[in-house]
Image: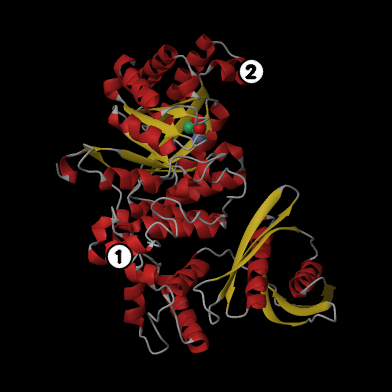
Amino acid sequence: MTTASKRRIYILDTTLRDGEQAPGFSMNLPEKIEVAKRLEKLGVDIIEAGFPASSPGDLEAVKTIAGIVTNSTVAALCRCLEKDIDAAWEALANAAANPRIHVFLATSPVHMEHKLKMTQEQVLDQAAASVRYAKHFCADVEFSAEDAFRSDPDFVCNVFGAVIEAGALTVNFPDTVGYAMPAEFGERIRYVKEHTPGMEKACLSVHCHNDLGLAVANSIAAIANGADQVECTVNGIGERAGNASLEELVMSLRVRNDYFTADTGIDSTRLYPASRLVAKVTGVKVQPNKAIVGANAFVHQAGIHQHGVLINRETYEIMTPESIGLPREMLEAPNRIVLGKHSGRHAFEDRLSELGLTVDPEILEKVFVEFKNLANKKKIVGDRDLEALVMYNTVSVPETWVLDHWAVNTGSALGASGVIRLQHKDGRFEKLVSMGDGPIDAIFKAINQIIGREPELELYEIGAITGGSSSQGETMVRIGMNGKHWNGRGISTDIIESSINAYLSAVNVMEWDLR
Ligand code: KIV
Ligand code: ZN
């Protein structure tokens, strides 16, 4: 069966909502915009961009993304409350294309009794009334029965029937706490499909969490039993152990197209760049043995395996790295020279597009200038360098503080001291010297004194972009204050400067957020 003749499975990506709400995965507005653009290019059908009633920042993010995205539907989540639905619509009203209001209400006994303090009748009435209210604003309304898997199946069918009658075009069956087993989940989906009144008028969706590591398996069992839409996230990020991983779902259907009679509309060659972007903006690395996008996913270590793939790749490879957008040469030699200081703009742009890195024309010029500077300093510019350059230039916020210069003095016999001069956006320069437990501590303390704030350094990680002693250092920091958290990233051929860049970028995100 060709891809075209297969049953179409719709992908609702919730990286920017369920993914972002997990601790340590927060993203700022420019980062969310970049992720949304990447999801649109990937071919995601519905981008769940946030939960507008949860914070003014979420409302602004959904509004901005809805105003930009044209090829995917943009969804906003809300509780079954008029004020939440109003906030969702405020964010979606000026959508460039198709907006979706996604309302949810729990249907399981434990949620209804202890959290909602509502009876089944009240839940059913509120669900239907909320869908009716949302339909005043928006034709496309989705209803989710939170904790559906631990709910009475016949009650869920009744609620689904009532909300379909009220106008819901999609009904979603979440395994909110990741409790289901695949065969059991598949059977439940078939039951709901067959016993929900009016089900033929709506799309049946599933939303699986990964608490027992079964989110993808459960989603696939649901597809095999009639689900039309799956909700998932890039790299499987999300509440607790995460959500079903988008790339695993997509590639399972694609690689086993001999087995499945269904497929998605995702361009699989954009999966790897999307995974890298999400890992970079959240500052959370993908585990090396993660299926599809982990660093080891295509690496053959054992001699017998290496021998096998040299004779015929199919001995140990069920898919090619190219099929997920990872050029084989990038995998085998990430720090080989791809471009040098004499490379022209064409070669530069061609390589970016081979790597699936699309850059807006206004940013391209800046990235090209920085590439030339780097090529002069470093001689070897590899694919990972290009990836970092694009990333650092596309997701930055307006800067309050810019680095002018710095110096540190350190050694085994002396304490460390650092001096730094920063320029404020209003033009003034500020310079400070500070002592510390090491050069990084000294310089970060000096920055804190200049900016007049003392955020907590919650995460500091430094690594080499390409490997080898000539590699650029890449630093990731997270700072926090009064329950809020901000990420920053920096790159430089000097590791102290890369740390300063990362710290300042987090400071700039903080200043922008607190403006
Ligand atoms: O896990 C869940 O039940 C959810 C719903 C709000 C869809 O995220
Ligand atoms: Zn969820």
Residue furthest toward the front? 304
Question: SS of the residue at dot 2?
Answer: helix
Mark with earlier residue (1, 2): 2
Q: Residues within 10 Å of mark 1 (few under 14, many from 20)?
A: few
Type of amino acid at the residue the image marks with label 2: His
Question: SS of the residue at dot 1?
Answer: helix
Seen at 80% across and 69% down, the residue is 445
Instruction: Look at the picture and state if 393 lies above or below 429.
Output: above
Seen at 37% across and 52% down, the residue is 40
| Towards the viewer: 247 or 47 | 247
Residue 169, given in percent of the width and then of the height, sits at 34, 28
Residue 192, given in percent of the width and then of the height, sits at 35, 19
Question: Disc 1 to disc 2, how far (Cα)?
Answer: 59 Å
Residue pointed to by mark 1: 307
Type of amino acid at the residue the image marks with label 1: His
Instruction: Look at the picture and state if 320 lies above or below 115.
Output: below
Residue 482, given in percent of the width and then of the height, sits at 76, 49
- Between disc 1 and disc 2, the foreground one is 1
**In screen coordinates, is 196 left or right of 88?**
left
Residue 245, given in percent of the width and then of the height, sits at 42, 44
Residue pointed to by mark 2: 114
Seen at 45% across and 41% down, the residue is 93
| Towards the viewer: 37 or 206 | 206
